[in-house]
Image: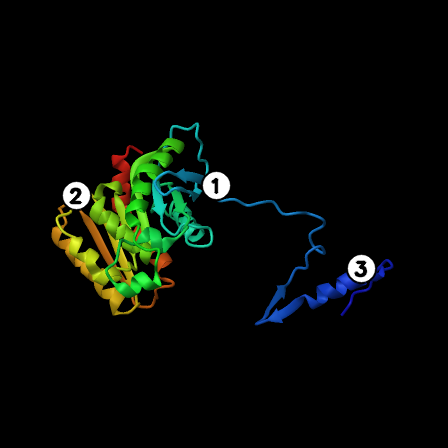
Amino acid sequence: MIPKMKHRIQPIEWLKYLLFLFSVKRTHGFFVLFLFPGFYSNGQTGQPFSIGETVQLQSAVLAETRTLNIYLPYGYSADSAKTYPVIYLLDGSADEDFIHIAGLVQFLAFPWINCLPETIVVGISNVDRKRDFTFPTTVEQDLIDFPTTGHSAEFMEFIEKELVPFMDASYKTTADRTLIGQSLGGLLATEILVTKTSLFNMYFIISPSLWWDHESLLNRVSDLNLAGKSIYIAVGNEGKEMINPARELYKKLKKMGQADTRLFYDYFKDKTHADALHNAVYAGFEKMKKDIWRHVGQCGI
């Protein structure tokens, strides 16, 4: 029913009013209002909303410019004496895993959650992830299907000799560093753990593609100095070629772990390769809470 009006309504106002009526629909006992741009905005325009900054880093090692997406905790100031741990996120493009992982880090650092200290997140945007995340393979078909693969050594050198020094020189960082990698990123995270163990304090290895090159990376998992390391491995219901190598990695690391090595493994039977990452990172941070604060304490925060 249209209410009585005390003044004459112009035709355009009637049209707007009718649009308003048609925009209200009753759904399951609730009225859902669909807003029409221009009718309700009163001429107001939106403002950009930012959760961080994007930086271009010229890499001499890779001979290319790499894009970094960087989340800075609320209140971060270059003039402050406060320093922050850093999470290095593979597959860190804006349209990949940067936004949802940065949001997770922000949430877990809320004082009423207190699972994480305030932390910087640097997402490394991809150029060619198959090139950067894989070591050379002996599988002929993979060489045919993925001709650019096999250059993880250069990418690891970029991380170690260019990216980490850049972050430490440009931001208020501690020596506490975490690496998160999933799928081929999990393969690379495992390779870094094996070949450059000391580069990170904490490793999140999610749904690692350890099937690469007939699982040859597992043969290199031996005699590692894992003292003080915290390592979280997780996999979803992704088939035997994903589940078995991830479990085998956990078993190998557990056999060589020192007394102060913290090692965790999760199997998410209701998750797939596509959706395991977010849940795994959340679960991993909860399980590693004591270890996170232990590392932070060592860094003087």
Q: Nearer the viewer, mark 3 or mark 1?
A: 1
Classify the position of the N terminus by image quarter. Answer: bottom right
Earlier in the chain: of badge 2 and badge 3, it is 3
Q: Which residue is mark 1?
A: 53
Check the image and name the residue furthest to the bottom. 28
**What is the CA distance from the residue labelled 2 to the residue labelled 3?**
72 Å
Q: Position of residue 92 (x, y in %)?
A: 40, 50
Check disc 2 and give the amino acid type: Ala
Which residue is drawn at the image coordinates 75% and 66% (left, top)? 18
Q: What type is the residue that disc 1 sits on?
A: Glu
Indicate the colouring scheme. rainbow
The C terminus sits in image quarter: top left
Query: Residue 203 versus residue 60: which sits nearer the camera?
Result: 60
Can you see residue 205? Answer: no
Crowding at mark 1 (Cα within 10 Å: few <14, some 14-19, many 20+) = few
From the viewer's perspective, is the residue at label 1 or at label 2 nearer?
Answer: 1
Check disc 3 and report its element: helix, strand or loop.
helix
Q: Secondary structure at mark 2?
A: loop
At a point 76% along the width and 62% down the height, the residue shown is 17
Query: What is the CA distance from the residue labelled 3 to the residue labelled 1?
Result: 43 Å
Instruction: Give the residue at x 63% y 47%.
Output: 46
Q: Residue at x 30, y 45 (%)?
A: 154
Foreground mark, 2 or 3?
Answer: 2
The earlier-in-sequence mark between 1 and 2 is: 1
* Residue identifier under label 2: 227
- Mark 1–mark 2 CB contact (< 8 Å): no
User: For mark 3, what is the residue?
Assistant: 13
CB under 8 Å between callouts 3 and 1? no
Residue 138, x across and y down, in percent: 23, 60
The kind of residue tagged 3 is Glu
Cα separation, mark 1 vs mark 2, equals 34 Å
